[in-house]
Amino acid sequence: MARIGVKKTYKLFINGEFPRTESGRSYPVVGKGGVLLANACRGSRKDLRNAVQAARKAVAAWSGKTAYNRGQILYRIAEVCESRAGELAEELRRQGSSAADARKEIERVIDRWLYYAGWSDKYPQVFGSVNPVAGPYYNFTVPEPTGVAGIIAPEEPALLGLVSRIAPAIVGGNTVVAVTSESRPLAAITLGEVFETSDVPAGVVNLISGLKSELVPWLAAHMDVNAIDATGVTPDKLADVQKAAAENVKRYVHFDGDEIGWTDDRLSQSPYAIFEFQEMKTVWHPMGM
Amino acid sequence: MPPMTETVLAPAGRSLTPVSFRRSLNDALEMAHGVDAVAAEERASSLAKRSLKKDSKVWGLKLAVSMIDLTTLEGKDTRGKVWALCRKAVRPDPADPEVPHVAAVCIYPSMVAFVKEALGDSGVHVAAVATGFPSGQTFTEIKVEETRRTVAAGADEIDMVIDRGAFLSGDYQKVFDEIAEVKEACGPAHLKVILETGELANFDQVRKASLIAMYAGADFIKTSTGKVAVNATLPVTLVMLEAIRDFYHATGKKIGMKPAGGISNAKLALSYLVLLYETLGAEWMNPDMFRIGASTLLNDILMQLRKEKTGAYQSGDYFTID
Amino acid sequence: MLWEYSPSPEATDHVRIASRYNLFIGGKFVEPHSKKWFETINPATEATLAEMAEADAEDVDRAVREARRAYEKVWKKFAPSERAKYIFRIARLIQEKSRALAVVETMNGGKPIKESRDIDIPLAAAHFFYYAGWADKLEYAFPNRNVSSIGVAGQIIPWNFPLLMAAWKIAPALAAGNTVVLKPAETTPLTSMMLAEIMMEADLPPGVVNIITGAGATGAALVSHEDVDKIAFTGSTEVGKKIQRALSGTDTKLTLELGGKAPNIVFEDAPIDQAVEGIINGIYFNQGHVCCAGSRLFVQESIIEPVIRKLRERISTLRVGNPLDKNTDVGAINSRAQLEKIQELVDSGVEEGAEMFQSSCSLPAKGFWFAPTFFTGVSQSNRIAQEEIFGPVLSVLTFRTPEEAIEKANNTPYGLSAGVWTEKGSRILKMAQKLRAGVIWANTYNKFDPASPFGGYKESGFGREGGLHGLAPYVKLS
């Protein structure tokens, strides 16, 4: 008799843990031919609230780590992705990708982590400056993380899209609450397991699956979220996100994946993506004896 | 206490109780926090931009004359030269009786008796430098003895120099003790302590030296001998005035201030008065509390006063070089 | 005795203010479609200075069309090095007319002549100089990207630094190859009109810069105009949010420089007399009409007594009065409305139990005035510790540990600027890192420079003005 496999329950990833949604609800994730793949958590606004709280709590320690240390952790994420590449690819495949496409997407995901890992101690040198002011002052500008970033992942590519937006945010010291691809959340949630085993401190990345129509308005309006990345919001809903973002003057970030695509390595990954989640701080100090 | 409303230092509704003043090096060093050089310089230069016109200018210029320590401190000083200076001190502008006499004539000790006689009962004080001026590099006993003899010869005021060597090597106790001893030797004479700020490296040191001098017994603190490359400047004077202000608040004792060296024109002299007025207030605006050590300044002020009177810019040919 | 400085007023006889100004559109002054004009006054005397055209939606449309035409037909096609020459010319012309500009700035806005003369106008010229040099060097600012201009920039500026804010807005926009429609604040339009005359004298191609006057409705029409590619706004957080909302769902790029409630933190080892100067300069500079004003003073408890004493002494020496007098330190409040807002908040401070100290200076009978004021015994929850007063009013709070100072300082929706005073170098750097604000002044305050980026965190806005970073809002990268 064939062995009966153990099926995985796909849960949320909040504060380094894998809770079920507090709503107790789930929604079906279906694969090719309408096959039920899993019952994913239908995250609620209270899950978002908990995630934002965890993200806020994590900001000080994460942004306070040395750039070298953050780079090491992102590199570790790449390593763990590599070792779990088969599992992640299999999830993408079950969600509808061809085996070859799934493999390619995973390779790109791993390389993207590597790419941003390498930026950790370089982007401040690219975007910072020493400013020659007309007076006896030393004046410099440094990039600093904006704080908590809300990221809405695109539906496709479910994993590469999510990683392409999370990586530049966290390498710059931000913490993230991400809403995963609604139709294809499985690999995204498995990514939480990658974070959990990669020395990423609790709360730095939080992943919420569910219905975007239920989640996005709350994330966009949350007063303790500093930046909102609406990459995965459909064009007809962008205005609503922006309007809600104005309540606390959120930074609005949007990557046009449909136009640029996710495989152009000059435009779909760059330090400018890090820059979008950064504040520029300028410091003055007199120079005297 | 006098009514407070007219002074900078005593805001309305707040009385100032003089605290007992004791001579203590520790108290001085405790108050000697850092000074930010750039900000001090900016404050001084912003005050120097005050625009003084008409009555306020004339009033300020006459006040400045009355605060001058008319100075000659040269190896080649003779009785003839000093006598002429005394005449100028008593009656700076023979053509204008409204111009007051200067505060003091400042000379080397050997000239004290002669100057005392030359000035007579004019009201102009006799000030003499002492204590191995200008370097101060001699024995303490000699400094004390020089002070005693100079006062005995008739000096109303003694301008001493601190031992910068001791100060810069961190021997504040020696600096403090020497000032205290000289103060005692002064008897009734007023003691002005020259810090020689041009040799003290930075404002932190100027503040520290100011406090040491005041706590050791100085009646005045003074910037410079006039014998080094950098003499009085506006920011150094500001830092010293601020030290005087803090000392006053801590002890209730008012110390005078004397910038000296390099103050050679009327505009600059007015800037010093503005600095004084806006830092310590009206109670310091008199020759008992503020002096300007200068030689060529007087004529420039006289020219400015004449200009205010006649409306025409003046020529040096019409003012005596003494 | 008191030394009364004799009046030393800056001469005004060399300044020519027209009785009426029209809209500067397409390189010339044109009558407004609205056929309406409003008066602009001198807040120190309440005397009318001139009549200004009120631009309505049609006028805004005309200005945007001119800007669009100039962008497509002229400005975009210029070699960047040639664009630079015009911007250099503008800088030079501002220098040549500096005194007249300073006098008008002071008459129209109420700020002391020593500030308009020594800060506003020289900095405005310096800003044009700085960005002129960038015009043909943009590719060095954005590595590995192609840089292009955006198009038409709509810019709305406040009344606290009228000409300087115009320079902050126009200079980078032109350097990056955009054309401009600028709306100055309704209470301080005059130096913008002089700037329009300078644009003509510089032979700037018609339509490259258009300047239209009016109030909130004019600004709203500019924001909502479909052919504007970029909006840059400096002003209140309230209006900034409205603009951000109004632009939702559009591709219009936006930068906001909004309000603040900056902490100014004094540690016990601070150079105290300089810190007191910094506190004074931080809050009473330009009557406190400064978005980055150090309006919340945090003093370490161990030195609160001498700091308060020195503040009282120092505030009493501030010379309040005729802004044209060269010795005036604090001028007139910009408008009656602003004066009422300040008074309302100060009343709330008294009601909430804070202790008020006010300079006993005498105030002129005519015009809008407010004596330099500070409150002690203020708690975090008081309105005067939370809301932007935008006037010469300081709230003094205390702290015991650096952690407490950081926590209280950051406990605000704003994040524009912050001050730190301490002699300890490592503490300066740690504080500078921990304070959530775009500009940190350590052992100094309220310093500005064209090479130095300026702008806020959180509800103080986004985007930077000044420096290399000030170019980013005006370029498209590909």
Image (cartoon, grey):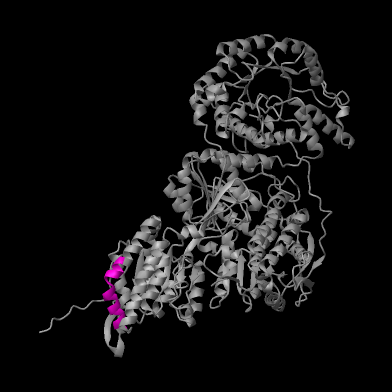
Q: Residue furthest left?
A: A1
On whether residue C97 falls in the magenta region, the answer is: no
In the image, residue C129 lies at what x, y percent?
A: 68, 58
Residue A279 coordinates in the image, percent (x, y): 50, 61
The quadrant of the image that shows the C terminus of chain B is top right
The magenta stretch spans which residues? A79-95
Position of C468 with respect to A2 (left or right) is: right
Near-viewer residue (A86 or B1): A86
Q: Quadrant of the N terminus of chain B?
A: top right
Q: Give the quadrant of residue B127.
A: top right
Where residue C86 appears, as percent x and y from the top left, is 72, 64
Q: Residue at x 65, y 34 (%)?
A: B4
Q: Quadrant of residue C121?
A: bottom right
Q: In this rendering, does residue A219 appear at all? A: yes
Residue C356 can be seen in this image: no
Q: Quadrant of residue B151?
A: top right
Task: Decide whether residue A88 is among the magenta residues.
Answer: yes
Mainly helix, strand or loop, the magenta region?
A: helix
Q: Position of residue C330 (x, y in %)?
A: 68, 49
